[in-house]
Image: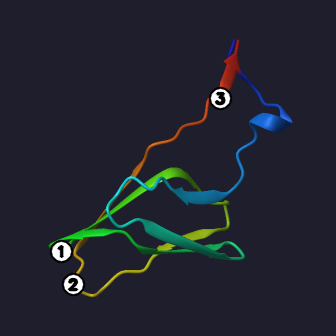
Amino acid sequence: MGGVLIASLQDRVFAQITPDNTLPNNSSVTREGNIFNITGATQARSNLFHSFSEFSVPISGTASFNNALDIQNIISRVTGGHLLKLMS
């Protein structure tokens, strides 16, 4: 028999993108409806590094990384986590 996902109201994950403030220059996130505009972050040569404690975008949402023209790679990580309770 397959697993059943059990979720309670306090375990729900709401759409949000939150920088974890671990980089020398942290990301900045502004939200306009379901569009998350992400700017800033730490640049090393043509790379841009982002670090988030939470990264959750709604199904109809967009995360837009806005960066300088000289950026070739955007590297992101998510350091936080959420536990899903599964029961069989």
- Residue type marked 2: Asp
Circle 3 SS class: loop
User: Which residue is disc 3 drawn over?
Assistant: 84
Q: Earlier in the sequence, mark 3 or mark 2?
A: 2
Depicted 7 relative to depicted 12: above or below: above
| Coordinates of residue 20 in the picture (x, y in percent) | 48, 53
Between 7 and 60, the one lying in front of the other is 7
Q: Is residue 71 left or right of residue 15?
A: left
Q: Quadrant of the N terminus?
A: top right
Residue 1 visible in image: yes
Quadrant of residue 82 in the image? Answer: top right
Q: Earlier in the sequence, mark 1 or mark 3?
A: 1
| Coordinates of residue 18 in the picture (x, y in percent) | 56, 58
- Residue type marked 3: Leu
Q: Is residue 20 left or right of residue 77?
A: right
Quadrant of residue 55 in the image? Answer: bottom right
Q: Earlier in the sequence, mark 1 or mark 2?
A: 1
- Residue type marked 1: Ser
Distance from disc 1 to disc 3, alpha carbons, whole Å, reads 37 Å
Circle 1 or circle 3, nearest the eye = 1
Depicted 62 relative to depicted 69: above or below: above
User: Which residue is disc 1 drawn over?
Assistant: 46
Circle 1 SS class: loop
Image mark for residue 60? none
Distance from disc 1 to disc 2, alpha carbons, whole Å, reads 6 Å
Image mark for residue 70? 2
Q: Residues within 10 Å of mark 1 (few under 14, many from 20)?
A: few
Q: Residues within 10 Å of mark 3 (few under 14, many from 20)?
A: few
Identify the residue at image location x=36%, y=69%: 41
